[in-house]
Image: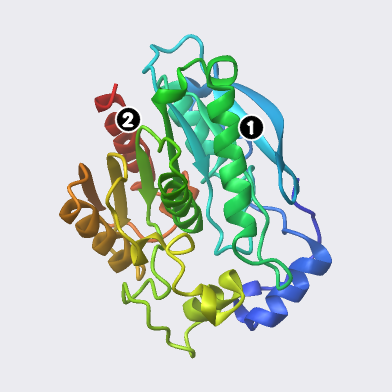
Amino acid sequence: MPETTDVPDLRSMSLPEALRWLREHGEPADRRPDVDTASLRRRFPRLADVSVEEHDIRTPHGIQPARVYRDRTARASARALVWVHGGAFIGGHLDMPESNWVALELASRGIPVLAADYSKCLGDVHFPVPSDDVLAAWEMADARAADLLGVDPGSLLLGGASAGGNLTAGVTARLRDFGAPVPAGLVLVYPVVHPNGPAASAQLDPASLHSQLTMNFVGSADRLADPHAFAALGSAAGFPPTLVLVCEHDGLRPSGEAFAGQLEAAGVAVELRIETGADHGHINEPDDPTALPAIEAIANWIWTLS
């Protein structure tokens, strides 16, 4: 669980200050009183039969936690999803709604989920470390698809939100370029797949926080052009069917939209959904009226692949 302590407003800090605070104190606890699993089950009774199992993933850089979500009472979709949360590459965890609530909801709709965590880039860690962690999660899920998730390996999808969308798109590119089977489908929710997400560009604006976070992720300028760090900088050929979900009011919307167009131009079956009235991070807010329709759209899209 994230550490509980008196937390300053990290958004008011410079990035180096925020990274230093996070290194010293750990991820701050979520102060919302109703986003833990028990509260979510009370609020959304359909989640009552979803089982949650804790797992460890061995990565090249150590152990990362993961959770498997399954509802054996639900009609099975014959698909399962490896899901990766966001957090600007510096935060996020398995308890946040963008991970836990999303996984509970999808599992209740017959889509088992392995939700995976990864190393955060807190000034001393950079790409490819978090990508390696997500790749290790995918490989474990692929190797144990039947016993962990109840599906064949060829029925396994990969997806993530924001920074998690970046990492899962990058891992898909790595698998393709390694000659390994790619996921049966890819789910990208408000993904950041360009170094400059707001401009859908490789050109950074050094004054912007987004560009500072990008440099903190890659660690050095020579990594900025790596298509495994930013999938939109490489070929989209060979990607699996993909759902790209972006938010109407999200400043990072151009990155997802441009990548959807890139996928389509490469002949990939892609669906672009623009969530009207939504902003970045909306599926991390169970009270946001635009959040549940987005999760339902993800579930419906996965069911269409079955």
Q: Residue at x 63, y 38 (%)?
A: 36
Where residue 169 appears, as percent x and y from the top left, is 42, 52
Q: In this view, does 281 lie to the left or right of 51?
A: left
Q: Which residue is drawn at 20% across and 58% down?
A: 261
Q: Which residue is drawn at 50% across and 40% down?
A: 83
Nearer-the-camera pick, 26 or 159: 159
Q: Do the residues labelled 2 and 1 touch (CB within 8 Å)?
A: no
Q: In this view, does 242 lie to the left or right of 82?
A: left
- Report whether residue 287 is seen: no
Give how far apart the Cα atoms at labels 2 and 1 are.
20 Å
State whether residue 65 is above or below residue 142: below
The image's mark for residue 287 is none
Q: Is residue 14 left or right of residue 264?
A: right
- Report whether residue 62 is seen: yes
State whether residue 80 is above or below residue 189: above
10 Å crowding of disc 2: few (<14), some (14-19), many (20+): many
**Residue carrying label 1:** 67
Nearer-the-camera pick, 67 or 281: 67
Label 1 element class: strand
Nearer-the-camera pick, 150 or 8: 150
Type of the residue with mark 2 = Ile
Type of the residue with mark 1 = Arg
State whether residue 64 is above or below residue 152: below
Where residue 48 appears, as percent x and y from the top left, is 55, 19
For the C terminus, the quadrant is top left
Where residue 159 appears, as percent x and y from the top left, is 43, 43
Where residue 281 appears, as percent x and y from the top left, is 45, 56
For the N terminus, the quadrant is top right
10 Å crowding of disc 1: few (<14), some (14-19), many (20+): many
**Residue carrying label 2:** 302
Label 2 element class: helix
Farthest residue, direction bottom? 207
